[in-house]
Amino acid sequence: MDPFSSETEVEIGGIMNKFTLPKIISQGPAKEWIERRRTTIRPWGNFVDQKRFSKPKNFGELCKRMVKNVEHFQSNYVFVFLGLILYCIITSPMLLIALAIFFGACYIIYLRTQQSKMIMFGREMSPAHQYGIAGGVSFPFFWLAGAGSAVFWVLGATLVVIGSHAAFHELESGDLEELQMEPV
């Protein structure tokens, strides 16, 4: 069995799927966070239903919609964000190569720390220092791949997509009375 992964069953849209998660994710707070996201995901049909989109009447309604929709569709928005990251990585071969170099270096460091301790210039290096060196070695590749612009593209696209959806998606009928804001 791979020390990095564990098999997990997840139900998405009524279908049980088995997949492997890194062990660090399958334990503790990360697992709890993923489970919370999984259980609070809203149906995608309701999320993208075109009949539920309309222009807000005023600024107060716009603010109310944004607050309630971000709260209501939070898990869906996380998946939109992850999808945009995946799109950015797949469409940039240099970024894909830079990530492969970085994660390859991290995997080699992990394997080496299991066998023996690394000593450089007469001093024992902690795993954190070793991972820092892996990041330093990978930095030129990330710079050449335009990772900084990719990060800002993903953040900007996420704000536009999620902000537009939250602003124009009509509230559920039960959400109208809970949050009171004065129209401006």
Image (cartoon, rainbow, N blue to C red):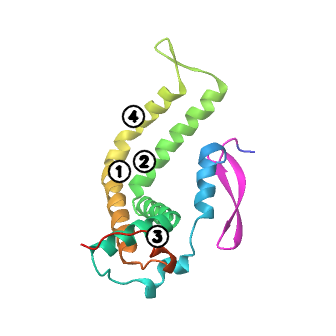
In primary-sequence order, the first of circles 1 and 2 is 2
Residue 103 % position (x, y):
51, 43
Residue drawn at 63 percent across, 63 percent down: 39
State the SS at label 2.
helix
Tell me the mark number nearer the camera, choosing from 3 and 1.
Answer: 3
Residue drawn at 41 percent across, 61 percent down: 88
Tell me the mark number nearer the camera, choosing from 3 and 4.
Answer: 3
Separation of marks 1 and 2 at Cα, in angstroms: 9 Å
Outermost residue toward the right? Answer: 1
Tell me the mark number nearer the camera, choosing from 1 and 2.
Answer: 1
- Residue annotated with mark 1: 147
State the SS at label 1.
helix
Magenta-drawn stretch, dominant element (helix, strand or loop): strand
Residue 88 belongs to magenta span: no
Separation of marks 3 and 2 at Cα, in angstroms: 47 Å
- Residue annotated with mark 2: 98
Dot 2 amino acid type: Ala
> In front: 68, or 152?
68
Residue 136 image label: 4
- Quarter holding the N terminus is top right
In primary-sequence order, the first of circles 3 and 1 is 1
Residue 61 % position (x, y):
33, 75
Residue 64 % position (x, y):
37, 70
Find the magenta span and give its range.
Answer: 3-25
